[in-house]
Amino acid sequence: MEVLPSRMTARDKRSFAYFTMKNRAPQILTKVINALHRHKDEFFEKHGEVGAEAEKKALSLLLKLQNELQTDESLRPLTDNCADTDIWNKYLEYHHSLLNENNKKISWFQSPWLYVECYMYRRIHEAFILSSPINDFDVFKDSKEQNFLESEEAILILCNYLQELNSRIENLNENQLKDEFFKFLQISLWGNKCDLSLSGGQSSSQVSSPLTALEDLQPFILVNNMEYLWSLLIKRKKMSEEKFPSTRVDFVLDNAGFELVTDLIMADFLLSSKLATEIHFHGKSIPWYVSDTNKNDMNWTISELKTANINCMSECGINWDDHFKKHRWIYHDHMFWTLPHDYCAMSQVAPDLYAELQKSNLILFKGDLNYRKLVADRKWEFTVPFYQALNGFHPAPLCSIRTVKAEVQVGLAPGHGEQITVTDPQWMSTGKYGIFQFDGNFDFV
């Protein structure tokens, strides 16, 4: 059996992993602490002295977490009593057994970067779970909503464009429909730049028109498998009556705010164009990675659009709410998405979720964290095929739609990654470049 490449860690002081754990992670924790403190009066008004004491307890736990990180202490087991606590603690034990063989400790800078980063967000969640009655407080809620509100002009442009297109979509020929499909895919791709964890929680809203920049951004798409996605969906549409009565597309979501709107607009187009008949969204079950989408974010976004005083925005909100009510759109939030496991372990760790994804005709994995989990955050060579890096994870045809924000990328042409590195040494951590990377049955498409 071929030996897999090692996982990325923060041991290398020249790596983006080190920069993240040394600088970005403490900065995020400081913002979490500040956000908690800003709501102190609200907790007191809602819960009285018990709420004030809960805020102090959560604050104490978060400060302890920050100190553990900055002093590279060993990771400790979780002490809450959630459904995933035992899974996390068993994963920690497993890493202890692996590292003990090599006389290494499990710590923030020595252990796999993806693991310790996920562990940090799970510890943030633990701090609130242990601080009843504020245990359901989403400390990232304000920043996610701010991202949406600061992006309202761009959202207005997209909603207006979608409504106008939907009014004439029946009259589009196949080439015109394909052009619109590619356009919405690219809007969804570049919407992934709005990532609050990359910016350390700083504003990362979309202020310019997302439509006018698409042509200029095309040279920055490093892997472009949009044709495969089109071929798969249009063939199913053409054969739908006799062979494929339904076509299901799944979105494994990334960021709330502007990016979520771009995903909802893409999903709307897929239904109105009849390229899909049902859409399934997969979000997080707890607050995660600063800006990741959970069910409350989805509900808030649709409610905000429904009550907008601009017709095209309110129409989108009303239509999307109706899609959920009529089950044309379905939301899932399996706890696996906030576990530390790579996706190649899903069939063993969460066989129910894997079986659910197997029902899909196309799975769109949005964003950098999903990509890192797809390819296990390993030090792959640039030219390793995507199929190989997935290491057995093939529930259905899938595509990663990602702007590159971490030092892992596969499936590039020989010399391509090295060539970009010469002209742009930091290209893997800025979100400047994007990919549409497909894995599936190429014979079919």
Image: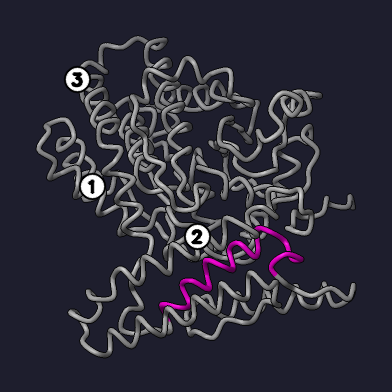
Who's the residue at 59% across and 31% down the image? 435
Horizontal and vertical percent position of residue 275: 39, 28
Sequence-first disc among 1 and 2:
2
Q: Quadrant of residue 173?
A: top left
Image position, residue 115 (x, y; %): 65, 63
Lower sequence index among marks 3 and 1 = 3
Residue 57: x percent and y percent? 41, 85
Q: Is mark 3 on a helix, strand or loop?
A: loop
Which stretch did the figure color magenta?
Answer: 108-129
Please indicate whether residue 160 sits to the left or right of residue 407 in the image.
left
**Closer to the camera in the image, 225 or 340:** 340
Kind of residue at disc 2: Ile
Q: Where is residue 215 in the image (x, y as percent from the top left)?
A: 47, 15
Give the spatial CA distance, label 1 vs label 2: 27 Å
Distance Cα–Cα, label 3 vs label 1: 21 Å
Can you say which quadrant of the picture contains the C terminus? top right
Q: Which residue is under mark 3?
A: 167
Residue identified by numbered label 2: 28
| Residue shown at the point (60%, 37%) measured from the top left | 404
Q: Is residue 120 left or right of residue 344?
A: left
Tag of residue 9: none
Q: Is residue 230 magenta?
A: no
Between tags 2 and 3, which lies in front? 2
- Which circle, 1 or 2, is nearer the viewer? 2
Does 114 appear in magenta? yes
Q: What element carries label 2?
A: helix
Question: What residue is shown with label 1?
Answer: 302
Q: Which of 128 and 235 is in front in this view?
A: 128
